[in-house]
Amino acid sequence: MSCIWRQGVDGLWASRIVPPGRTLSGQELGTAGIAFHDLEGAERGVLLLVQPGVWVRVNGLPVLGGVRVLGHKDEILVSEGRLFLSLESTPTVVLFHAPGGGRAPICPICRGPIRDGCEAIQCPGCSRWFHQAGPSAGSPGKPCWTYAPTCRFCNHPTPLDATAAWRPDQEEIHV
């Protein structure tokens, strides 16, 4: 789930979620003349919309034509302050269904197939599938996704809670 981080006058960072498939106005962040629209589907990112005459820079460059697709950790400078975008999303346990009856993917942790109807998680970072079945009826379960603190391929955090792993205040940001 995408979110915009804004640095307050006290120097502390606060985040605001960009609603999936919807638009977050800059006024909701205390910044006039801009808006953020979450892109759904394969084009993962957030569209930045800038009204004519509004001063905005993304990673130090002006937003030409008033539109820019933002990526993870992009810095947005506006006259009212600085913002950062995080594309980090929380992994969700779902019942797996192979698209079009295709071949079952192999879990990279236990090396077993992920079958239809099995509880699984698709990594938000690299899109690989992992088992995440809880214990039931004498079975110990298959917590393959939460086996390690991060995905072994893309380092996306594996906790199932909604806490953000990336925050702008953890980076060395130079003014």
Image (cartoon, rainbow, N blue to C red):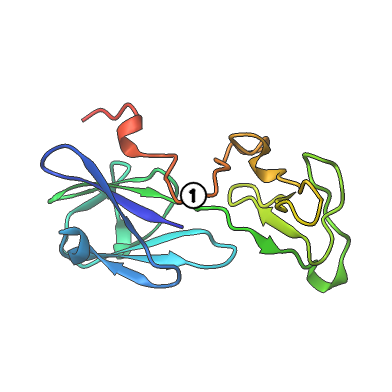
Q: Quadrant of residue 151?
A: top right
Of residues 98 and 46, the one drawn nearer to the viewer in this rendering: 98
- Image x and y of residue 85, in percent: 36, 50
Mark 1, Cα crowd under 10 Å, few <14 / some 14-19 / many 20+, is few
Q: Looking at the image, how many numbered discs can be counted on the residues?
A: 1
**Which residue is the extreme one toward the front?**
138
Q: Is residue 89 above or below residue 118?
A: above
Of residues 168 and 163, the one drawn nearer to the viewer in this rendering: 163
Q: Residue at x 12, y 51 (%)?
A: 80
Horizontal arrangement in the rendering, residue 25 relative to residue 68 (left or right): left
- Image x and y of residue 82, in percent: 22, 45
On the image, numbered disc 1 is attached to which residue?
A: 161
Three-letter amino acid code at disc 1? Asp
Q: Secondary structure at mark 1?
A: loop
- Image x and y of residue 23, in percent: 34, 71
Q: Quadrant of residue 55?
A: bottom left
Q: Residue at x 18, y 65 (%)?
A: 27
Q: Residue at x 72, y 43 (%)?
A: 144
- Image x and y of residue 148, in percent: 64, 34
Horizontal arrangement in the rendering, residue 6 relative to residue 90 (left or right): left
Of residues 123 and 52, the one drawn nearer to the viewer in this rendering: 123
Q: Is residue 91 above or below residue 11?
A: below
Quadrant containing the C terminus is top left
Horizontal arrangement in the rendering, residue 41 relative to residue 119 (left or right): left
Q: Is residue 44 above or below residue 37?
A: above
